[in-house]
Protein backbone atom coordinates (compact mmCIF):
# COMPACT_ATOMS: atom_id res chain seq x y z
CA UNK A 1 0.00 0.00 0.00
CA UNK A 2 1.26 3.54 -0.69
CA UNK A 3 2.65 5.53 2.18
CA UNK A 4 1.54 8.97 3.21
CA UNK A 5 4.45 11.01 1.91
CA UNK A 6 7.20 10.76 4.55
CA UNK A 7 4.84 9.69 7.35
CA UNK A 8 4.84 6.04 8.29
CA UNK A 9 1.06 5.73 8.20
CA UNK A 10 -0.74 3.43 5.84
CA UNK A 11 -3.70 5.02 4.10
CA UNK A 12 -6.92 3.00 4.41
CA UNK A 13 -8.65 1.96 1.19
CA UNK A 14 -11.64 4.18 1.98
CA UNK A 15 -9.38 7.22 2.15
CA UNK A 16 -7.83 6.33 -1.19
CA UNK A 17 -11.35 6.24 -2.64
CA UNK A 18 -12.05 9.70 -1.26
CA UNK A 19 -8.85 11.03 -2.79
CA UNK A 20 -9.60 9.32 -6.06
CA UNK A 21 -12.99 11.01 -6.34
CA UNK A 22 -11.37 14.43 -6.11
CA UNK A 23 -8.61 13.45 -8.51
CA UNK A 24 -11.29 12.48 -11.00
CA UNK A 25 -12.62 16.04 -10.96
CA UNK A 26 -15.34 15.88 -8.30
CA UNK A 27 -16.29 19.17 -6.64
CA UNK A 28 -13.91 19.60 -3.67
CA UNK A 29 -16.53 21.67 -1.85
CA UNK A 30 -19.80 19.70 -2.05
CA UNK A 31 -22.89 21.09 -0.29
CA UNK A 32 -23.06 20.58 3.45
CA UNK A 33 -25.22 17.59 4.36
CA UNK A 34 -28.29 18.17 6.54
CA UNK A 35 -26.42 17.42 9.74
CA UNK A 36 -27.04 19.75 12.66
CA UNK A 37 -24.91 18.43 15.52
CA UNK A 38 -21.77 19.89 13.92
CA UNK A 39 -21.03 23.45 12.82
CA UNK A 40 -22.27 24.45 9.36
CA UNK A 41 -19.84 23.71 6.54
CA UNK A 42 -17.47 21.59 8.60
CA UNK A 43 -18.12 18.20 7.04
CA UNK A 44 -17.32 19.13 3.43
CA UNK A 45 -14.15 20.87 4.58
CA UNK A 46 -13.00 17.84 6.55
CA UNK A 47 -13.75 15.59 3.61
CA UNK A 48 -11.64 17.85 1.41
CA UNK A 49 -8.80 17.71 3.94
CA UNK A 50 -8.97 13.93 3.93
CA UNK A 51 -8.71 14.00 0.16
CA UNK A 52 -5.37 15.80 0.52
CA UNK A 53 -4.17 13.06 2.91
CA UNK A 54 -4.12 15.34 5.96
CA UNK A 55 -2.07 13.25 8.40
CA UNK A 56 -3.76 14.75 11.45
CA UNK A 57 -7.09 13.18 10.40
CA UNK A 58 -5.97 9.71 9.40
CA UNK A 59 -6.04 8.04 12.86
CA UNK A 60 -9.62 9.23 13.41
CA UNK A 61 -10.63 8.22 9.89
CA UNK A 62 -9.10 4.77 10.35
CA UNK A 63 -10.95 4.30 13.65
CA UNK A 64 -14.23 5.44 12.09
CA UNK A 65 -13.94 2.97 9.22
CA UNK A 66 -12.95 0.18 11.61
CA UNK A 67 -16.01 0.98 13.74
CA UNK A 68 -18.17 1.05 10.62
CA UNK A 69 -16.83 -2.29 9.43
CA UNK A 70 -17.86 -3.79 12.77
CA UNK A 71 -21.23 -2.07 12.50
CA UNK A 72 -21.83 -3.89 9.21
CA UNK A 73 -22.48 -6.92 11.41
CA UNK A 74 -24.91 -5.02 13.65
CA UNK A 75 -28.29 -6.76 13.70
CA UNK A 76 -30.99 -4.09 13.30
CA UNK A 77 -32.96 -3.54 16.48
CA UNK A 78 -36.63 -2.75 17.06
CA UNK A 79 -39.00 -1.84 19.86
CA UNK A 80 -40.60 -5.18 19.06
CA UNK A 81 -37.54 -6.93 20.56
CA UNK A 82 -38.73 -6.46 24.14
CA UNK A 83 -40.34 -9.56 25.70
CA UNK A 84 -43.67 -7.83 26.32
CA UNK A 85 -45.41 -4.55 25.71
CA UNK A 86 -45.52 -1.70 28.21
CA UNK A 87 -48.64 -0.36 29.85
CA UNK A 88 -50.36 0.45 26.55
CA UNK A 89 -50.29 -3.17 25.43
CA UNK A 90 -48.74 -2.18 22.10
CA UNK A 91 -45.13 -3.32 21.60
CA UNK A 92 -44.70 -0.65 18.94
CA UNK A 93 -44.79 1.90 21.78
CA UNK A 94 -41.38 2.74 23.25
CA UNK A 95 -41.18 1.69 26.90
CA UNK A 96 -38.49 2.09 29.57
CA UNK A 97 -38.10 2.15 33.35
CA UNK A 98 -36.85 4.98 35.55
CA UNK A 99 -33.17 4.30 36.35
CA UNK A 100 -32.95 5.70 39.89
CA UNK A 101 -35.95 3.90 41.39
CA UNK A 102 -35.76 0.65 43.37
CA UNK A 103 -38.22 -1.83 44.91
CA UNK A 104 -39.67 -0.75 48.24
CA UNK A 105 -38.14 -3.16 50.81
CA UNK A 106 -41.10 -2.72 53.14
CA UNK A 107 -43.65 -4.01 50.63
CA UNK A 108 -44.06 -7.65 49.54
CA UNK A 109 -44.46 -6.67 45.90
CA UNK A 110 -41.85 -3.91 46.11
CA UNK A 111 -44.38 -1.27 45.07
CA UNK A 112 -44.26 1.62 44.81
CA UNK A 113 -40.60 1.90 43.80
CA UNK A 114 -38.51 4.42 45.77
CA UNK A 115 -35.98 6.95 44.47
CA UNK A 116 -32.25 6.58 45.15
CA UNK A 117 -30.55 9.37 43.22
CA UNK A 118 -27.30 8.33 41.60
CA UNK A 119 -27.91 4.61 42.15
CA UNK A 120 -28.91 3.08 38.86
CA UNK A 121 -31.24 0.09 39.08
CA UNK A 122 -29.96 -2.51 36.57
CA UNK A 123 -33.58 -3.36 35.75
CA UNK A 124 -33.75 -0.07 33.83
CA UNK A 125 -31.19 -1.31 31.32
CA UNK A 126 -32.60 -4.80 30.93
CA UNK A 127 -34.31 -6.46 28.00
CA UNK A 128 -37.69 -4.95 28.93
CA UNK A 129 -36.36 -1.44 28.27
CA UNK A 130 -36.11 0.07 24.80
CA UNK A 131 -33.60 2.69 25.98
CA UNK A 132 -30.37 0.73 25.38
CA UNK A 133 -31.74 -0.60 22.09
CA UNK A 134 -32.49 2.90 20.82
CA UNK A 135 -29.03 4.15 21.83
CA UNK A 136 -27.30 1.25 20.05
CA UNK A 137 -29.47 1.71 16.96
CA UNK A 138 -28.66 5.42 16.71
CA UNK A 139 -24.94 4.87 17.28
CA UNK A 140 -24.75 2.20 14.58
CA UNK A 141 -26.72 4.28 12.08
CA UNK A 142 -24.56 7.36 12.66
CA UNK A 143 -21.30 5.39 12.47
CA UNK A 144 -22.26 3.74 9.20
CA UNK A 145 -23.61 6.97 7.71
CA UNK A 146 -20.47 8.92 8.61
CA UNK A 147 -18.32 6.25 7.01
CA UNK A 148 -20.48 6.44 3.90
CA UNK A 149 -20.15 10.23 3.76
CA UNK A 150 -16.38 10.10 3.88
CA UNK A 151 -15.88 7.06 1.60
CA UNK A 152 -19.04 6.83 -0.55
CA UNK A 153 -18.91 3.09 0.06
CA UNK A 154 -22.51 1.97 -0.49
CA UNK A 155 -22.09 -1.01 1.85
CA UNK A 156 -22.20 1.42 4.76
CA UNK A 157 -25.23 3.25 3.40
CA UNK A 158 -27.09 0.02 2.72
CA UNK A 159 -26.77 -1.19 6.27
CA UNK A 160 -27.43 2.24 7.80
CA UNK A 161 -30.61 2.43 5.75
CA UNK A 162 -31.69 -1.00 6.94
CA UNK A 163 -31.04 -0.08 10.59
CA UNK A 164 -33.12 3.11 10.24
CA UNK A 165 -35.98 1.48 8.34
CA UNK A 166 -36.33 -1.35 10.87
CA UNK A 167 -36.56 1.06 13.82
CA UNK A 168 -38.68 3.80 12.26
CA UNK A 169 -40.44 2.75 9.06
CA UNK A 170 -41.13 -0.94 8.49
CA UNK A 171 -44.76 -1.60 9.53
CA UNK A 172 -43.91 -4.81 11.39
CA UNK A 173 -41.08 -3.33 13.45
CA UNK A 174 -41.50 0.46 13.58
CA UNK A 175 -41.66 2.50 16.76
CA UNK A 176 -44.73 4.67 17.21
CA UNK A 177 -43.65 8.35 17.28
CA UNK A 178 -44.21 9.16 20.94
CA UNK A 179 -42.62 8.65 24.34
CA UNK A 180 -45.69 8.19 26.53
CA UNK A 181 -44.20 5.20 28.35
CA UNK A 182 -40.64 6.39 28.87
CA UNK A 183 -39.03 6.05 32.32
CA UNK A 184 -42.07 4.60 34.05
CA UNK A 185 -41.87 4.15 37.83
CA UNK A 186 -43.39 0.80 38.86
CA UNK A 187 -46.33 1.35 41.18
CA UNK A 188 -46.35 5.11 40.51
CA UNK A 189 -46.90 5.83 36.81
CA UNK A 190 -46.69 4.33 33.33
CA UNK A 191 -44.36 7.00 31.94
CA UNK A 192 -43.30 10.60 32.56
CA UNK A 193 -41.86 13.67 30.90
CA UNK A 194 -38.40 13.01 32.30
CA UNK A 195 -38.24 10.02 29.98
CA UNK A 196 -37.54 12.37 27.07
CA UNK A 197 -33.93 12.46 28.22
CA UNK A 198 -33.69 9.10 26.43
CA UNK A 199 -35.09 10.37 23.13
CA UNK A 200 -31.94 12.44 22.61
CA UNK A 201 -30.72 9.29 20.80
CA UNK A 202 -32.96 10.39 17.94
CA UNK A 203 -30.63 13.32 17.16
CA UNK A 204 -27.74 11.19 15.83
CA UNK A 205 -30.31 9.11 13.95
CA UNK A 206 -31.54 12.27 12.22
CA UNK A 207 -27.95 13.24 11.41
CA UNK A 208 -27.42 9.80 9.90
CA UNK A 209 -30.24 10.50 7.46
CA UNK A 210 -28.55 13.71 6.34
CA UNK A 211 -25.27 11.89 5.82
CA UNK A 212 -26.95 9.33 3.55
CA UNK A 213 -27.98 11.98 1.00
CA UNK A 214 -27.19 10.82 -2.52
CA UNK A 215 -26.97 7.15 -1.64
CA UNK A 216 -28.69 4.64 -3.87
CA UNK A 217 -29.62 2.81 -0.66
CA UNK A 218 -31.54 5.72 0.91
CA UNK A 219 -34.30 6.86 -1.40
CA UNK A 220 -36.40 10.03 -1.43
CA UNK A 221 -39.33 7.97 -0.22
CA UNK A 222 -37.29 6.81 2.80
CA UNK A 223 -36.31 10.39 3.54
CA UNK A 224 -39.88 11.66 3.27
CA UNK A 225 -41.19 8.87 5.50
CA UNK A 226 -38.65 9.54 8.23
CA UNK A 227 -39.27 13.29 8.02
CA UNK A 228 -42.95 12.54 8.57
CA UNK A 229 -42.10 10.33 11.57
CA UNK A 230 -39.90 12.99 13.15
CA UNK A 231 -42.55 15.63 12.47
CA UNK A 232 -45.11 13.56 14.36
CA UNK A 233 -42.69 13.03 17.25
CA UNK A 234 -41.94 16.77 17.31
CA UNK A 235 -45.66 17.51 17.49
CA UNK A 236 -46.05 15.01 20.35
CA UNK A 237 -43.10 16.55 22.22
CA UNK A 238 -44.66 20.01 22.05
CA UNK A 239 -48.29 19.17 22.78
CA UNK A 240 -48.40 16.10 25.06
CA UNK A 241 -48.48 16.33 28.85
CA UNK A 242 -45.15 14.51 29.09
CA UNK A 243 -43.56 16.80 26.53
CA UNK A 244 -44.84 19.93 28.27
CA UNK A 245 -43.54 18.63 31.60
CA UNK A 246 -40.07 18.19 30.13
CA UNK A 247 -40.13 21.63 28.55
CA UNK A 248 -40.88 23.11 31.99
CA UNK A 249 -37.91 21.36 33.65
CA UNK A 250 -35.36 23.83 35.03
CA UNK A 251 -32.34 21.51 35.00
CA UNK A 252 -30.53 19.38 32.41
CA UNK A 253 -33.83 17.87 31.31
CA UNK A 254 -35.03 21.24 30.06
CA UNK A 255 -31.71 21.82 28.28
CA UNK A 256 -31.85 18.46 26.51
CA UNK A 257 -35.50 19.12 25.63
CA UNK A 258 -34.52 22.36 23.89
CA UNK A 259 -31.69 20.63 22.04
CA UNK A 260 -34.09 18.00 20.75
CA UNK A 261 -36.85 20.38 19.70
CA UNK A 262 -34.41 22.64 17.85
CA UNK A 263 -32.74 19.66 16.18
CA UNK A 264 -35.96 17.99 15.06
CA UNK A 265 -37.32 21.34 13.86
CA UNK A 266 -34.24 21.82 11.68
CA UNK A 267 -34.58 18.24 10.41
CA UNK A 268 -38.14 18.84 9.21
CA UNK A 269 -37.28 22.30 7.86
CA UNK A 270 -38.93 24.48 10.52
CA UNK A 271 -36.14 27.00 11.02
CA UNK A 272 -38.51 29.47 12.66
CA UNK A 273 -39.24 27.06 15.51
CA UNK A 274 -35.57 26.11 15.83
CA UNK A 275 -34.51 29.76 16.03
CA UNK A 276 -37.18 30.53 18.61
CA UNK A 277 -36.10 27.65 20.84
CA UNK A 278 -32.40 28.55 20.66
CA UNK A 279 -33.09 32.24 21.28
CA UNK A 280 -35.27 31.41 24.30
CA UNK A 281 -32.40 29.38 25.79
CA UNK A 282 -30.68 32.65 26.67
CA UNK A 283 -33.27 33.36 29.35
CA UNK A 284 -34.93 29.98 29.93
CA UNK A 285 -31.74 27.96 30.30
CA UNK A 286 -28.52 30.00 30.62
CA UNK A 287 -29.93 32.77 32.84
CA UNK A 288 -32.09 30.31 34.75
CA UNK A 289 -29.49 27.61 35.34
CA UNK A 290 -26.07 29.28 35.56
CA UNK A 291 -24.94 31.69 38.25
CA UNK A 292 -22.51 34.56 37.71
CA UNK A 293 -19.65 32.40 39.03
CA UNK A 294 -20.48 29.65 36.53
CA UNK A 295 -21.98 27.20 39.01
CA UNK A 296 -25.14 25.28 38.13
CA UNK A 297 -26.98 24.96 41.46
CA UNK A 298 -29.63 22.49 40.33
CA UNK A 299 -26.95 20.11 39.08
CA UNK A 300 -24.76 20.64 42.15
CA UNK A 301 -27.64 19.35 44.29
CA UNK A 302 -27.50 15.96 42.58
CA UNK A 303 -25.51 12.88 43.38
CA UNK A 304 -22.66 12.81 40.83
CA UNK A 305 -22.88 16.61 40.83
CA UNK A 306 -19.77 17.17 38.71
CA UNK A 307 -20.99 14.77 36.07
CA UNK A 308 -24.45 16.34 36.06
CA UNK A 309 -22.93 19.82 35.72
CA UNK A 310 -20.95 18.57 32.74
CA UNK A 311 -24.03 16.80 31.36
CA UNK A 312 -26.11 19.97 31.45
CA UNK A 313 -23.26 21.93 29.88
CA UNK A 314 -23.09 19.30 27.12
CA UNK A 315 -26.80 19.86 26.43
CA UNK A 316 -26.32 23.63 26.31
CA UNK A 317 -23.32 23.22 24.01
CA UNK A 318 -25.58 21.16 21.75
CA UNK A 319 -28.14 23.98 21.70
CA UNK A 320 -25.34 26.47 20.98
CA UNK A 321 -24.16 24.38 18.01
CA UNK A 322 -27.72 24.25 16.69
CA UNK A 323 -27.78 28.02 17.10
CA UNK A 324 -24.99 28.28 14.54
CA UNK A 325 -27.44 26.91 11.96
CA UNK A 326 -30.02 29.63 12.63
CA UNK A 327 -27.81 32.64 13.32
CA UNK A 328 -28.15 32.75 17.11
CA UNK A 329 -24.94 33.03 19.15
CA UNK A 330 -25.02 31.33 22.54
CA UNK A 331 -21.26 30.76 22.75
CA UNK A 332 -20.53 34.36 23.68
CA UNK A 333 -23.92 35.32 25.10
CA UNK A 334 -23.74 36.69 28.64
CA UNK A 335 -26.58 37.47 31.03
CA UNK A 336 -26.84 40.83 32.80
CA UNK A 337 -25.14 39.32 35.87
CA UNK A 338 -22.32 37.80 33.79
CA UNK A 339 -23.43 34.16 33.55
CA UNK A 340 -22.43 32.35 30.36
CA UNK A 341 -21.51 28.99 28.90
CA UNK A 342 -17.84 29.88 29.18
CA UNK A 343 -18.27 30.74 32.86
CA UNK A 344 -19.93 27.37 33.46
CA UNK A 345 -17.01 25.66 31.76
CA UNK A 346 -14.44 27.69 33.71
CA UNK A 347 -16.17 26.74 36.96
CA UNK A 348 -15.51 23.04 36.29
CA UNK A 349 -12.07 23.28 34.70
CA UNK A 350 -9.85 23.44 37.84
CA UNK A 351 -11.43 20.29 39.24
CA UNK A 352 -10.98 18.44 35.96
CA UNK A 353 -7.36 19.57 35.66
CA UNK A 354 -6.37 18.79 39.25
CA UNK A 355 -7.63 15.46 40.52
CA UNK A 356 -6.28 16.23 43.99
CA UNK A 357 -8.36 19.40 44.27
CA UNK A 358 -11.34 18.58 46.52
CA UNK A 359 -14.72 18.90 44.81
CA UNK A 360 -16.78 20.64 47.51
CA UNK A 361 -20.13 19.48 46.15
CA UNK A 362 -19.55 15.75 46.26
CA UNK A 363 -22.74 13.93 47.18
CA UNK A 364 -22.64 10.25 47.93
CA UNK A 365 -19.59 9.09 46.00
CA UNK A 366 -16.37 10.14 44.30
CA UNK A 367 -16.79 12.16 41.12
CA UNK A 368 -15.26 11.08 37.81
CA UNK A 369 -14.56 14.69 36.78
CA UNK A 370 -14.34 14.03 33.06
CA UNK A 371 -14.98 16.88 30.63
CA UNK A 372 -14.26 14.84 27.51
CA UNK A 373 -17.74 15.42 26.08
CA UNK A 374 -17.25 19.19 25.90
CA UNK A 375 -13.48 19.73 25.72
CA UNK A 376 -12.99 19.54 21.96
CA UNK A 377 -15.88 21.86 21.16
CA UNK A 378 -14.69 24.25 23.88
CA UNK A 379 -11.17 24.30 22.47
CA UNK A 380 -12.50 24.88 18.95
CA UNK A 381 -14.92 27.67 19.87
CA UNK A 382 -12.85 29.57 22.40
CA UNK A 383 -9.42 28.96 20.81
CA UNK A 384 -7.99 28.27 24.25
CA UNK A 385 -4.62 26.52 24.37
CA UNK A 386 -5.29 25.41 27.94
CA UNK A 387 -8.36 23.52 26.77
CA UNK A 388 -6.49 22.04 23.85
CA UNK A 389 -3.71 20.83 26.15
CA UNK A 390 -6.29 19.17 28.41
CA UNK A 391 -7.94 17.56 25.41
CA UNK A 392 -4.68 16.05 24.18
CA UNK A 393 -4.26 14.33 27.54
CA UNK A 394 -7.58 12.52 27.16
CA UNK A 395 -7.24 8.84 26.14
CA UNK A 396 -7.89 8.43 22.44
CA UNK A 397 -8.08 12.18 21.76
CA UNK A 398 -6.15 11.90 18.48
CA UNK A 399 -8.23 9.14 16.94
CA UNK A 400 -11.64 10.07 18.33
CA UNK A 401 -14.43 10.51 15.81
CA UNK A 402 -14.80 14.13 16.91
CA UNK A 403 -11.46 14.90 15.23
CA UNK A 404 -13.37 14.65 11.93
CA UNK A 405 -16.31 16.70 13.19
CA UNK A 406 -14.84 19.48 15.33
CA UNK A 407 -11.63 20.87 13.80
CA UNK A 408 -9.23 22.76 16.04
CA UNK A 409 -7.59 24.54 13.11
Image: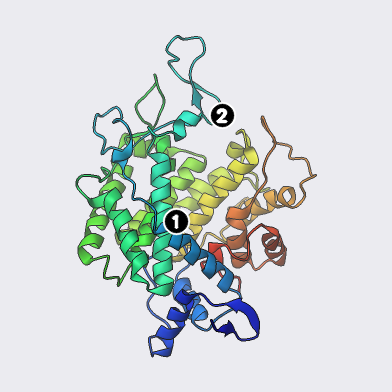
* Figure check: 227 above or below 219: above
* Figure check: 167 above or below 101: below
* Figure check: 334 above or below 220: above
Residue 112: quadrant of the picture: top left
x and y percentages locating residue 273 in the rendered image:
34, 56
x and y percentages locating residue 130 in the rendered image:
37, 39
The disc placed on residue 117 is 2
Residue 69: quadrant of the picture: bottom left
Local SS, label 2: loop
Q: Is residue 276 visible?
A: no
Q: In the image, 299: left or right of 157?
A: right
x and y percentages locating residue 117 in the rendered image:
56, 29
Query: To which residue does mark 1 refer?
Result: 279
Residue at the outermost front position = 1
Q: Which residue appears at 30% of the width and 70% of the height?
A: 215
Q: Nearer the viewer, residue 103 or 344?
A: 103
Amino acid sequence: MPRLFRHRIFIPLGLLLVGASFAAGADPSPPSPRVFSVSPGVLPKMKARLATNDASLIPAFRKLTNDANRALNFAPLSVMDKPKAGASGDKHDYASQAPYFWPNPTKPDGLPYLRKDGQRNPESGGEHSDAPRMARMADAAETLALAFFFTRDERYAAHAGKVLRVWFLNPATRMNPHFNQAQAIPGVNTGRGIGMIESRSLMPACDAVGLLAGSTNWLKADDAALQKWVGEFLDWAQTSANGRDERAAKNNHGSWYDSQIAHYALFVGDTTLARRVVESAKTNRIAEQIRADGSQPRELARADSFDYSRFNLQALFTVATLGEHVGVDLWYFQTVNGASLKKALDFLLPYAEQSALPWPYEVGKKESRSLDAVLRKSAAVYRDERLKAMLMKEPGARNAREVLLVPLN
